Image: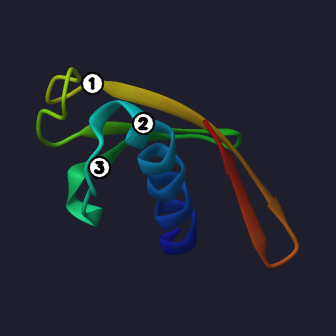
């Protein structure tokens, strides 16, 4: 679960960086939903055009000991 959360947040931060142009800490998003194929993150603070609470749904897959996340 920790690896999945970390990977999902990294995917979100890399996807948003061109718009927010700022580094985001691990506490900038939280998991609000999780199922066998999707994980939804919500921002915990406003980020350059994105409101606090803005939600982003990522796809995820476990392959052996690895986790892949895609936004």
Residue in front for this viewpoint, 70 or 64: 70
Question: Is the C-beta separation of discs 2 and 3 under 8 Å?
Answer: no
Mark number displayed over residue 18:
2
Left or right of 5, for residue 35: right
The residue closer to the viewer here, 18 or 2, is: 18
- Image point (78%, 72%), residue name: 66
The quadrant in which residue 62 appears is bottom right
SS of the residue at dot 1?
loop
Count residues near mark 1 (Cα–Cα under 10 Å), then give few for <14, some for 14-19, many for 20+. some
Q: Residues within 10 Å of mark 3 (few under 14, many from 20)?
A: some
| Residue depicted at x 70% and y 39% | 37
* Relative image position of residue 24 (x, y in whole percent): 27, 56
Q: Between disc 1 and disc 2, whose residue precedes?
A: 2
Q: Secondary structure at mark 2?
A: helix
* Residue positioned 44% across, 29% down in the render: 56
Q: Which mark is residue 8?
A: none
Q: Mark 2 to mark 3: distance in Å?
A: 20 Å
* Circle on res. 54: 1
Q: Quadrant of the C terminus?
A: top right
Mark 1 or 2: the one toward you: 2
Q: Which mark is residue 30?
A: 3
The image quadrant of residue 27 is bottom left
Q: Earlier in the sequence, mark 3 or mark 1?
A: 3
Q: Position of residue 14 (x, y in %)?
A: 49, 49
Q: Please name the residue shown 22% across and 52% down the image.
A: 28
Residue 45 % position (x, y): 11, 40
Q: Secondary structure at mark 3?
A: strand
- Sort mark 2 into few (<14), some (14-19) or many (20+) by Cα contacts within 10 Å: few
Q: Which is more foreground, mark 2 or mark 3?
A: 2
User: Where residue 58 sits in the image (x, y, percent)?
Assistant: 58, 36
């Amino acid at each position: 679960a920790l690896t999945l959360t970390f990977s999902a947040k990294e995917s979100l931060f890399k996807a948003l960086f061109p718009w927010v142009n700022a580094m985001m800490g691990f506490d900038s998003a939280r998991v609000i939903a999780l199922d066998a194929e999707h994980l939804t993150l919500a921002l915990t603070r406003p980020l350059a055009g994105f409101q606090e609470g803005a939600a982003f749904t990522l796809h995820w897959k476990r392959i052996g000991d690895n986790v892949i996340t895609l936004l």
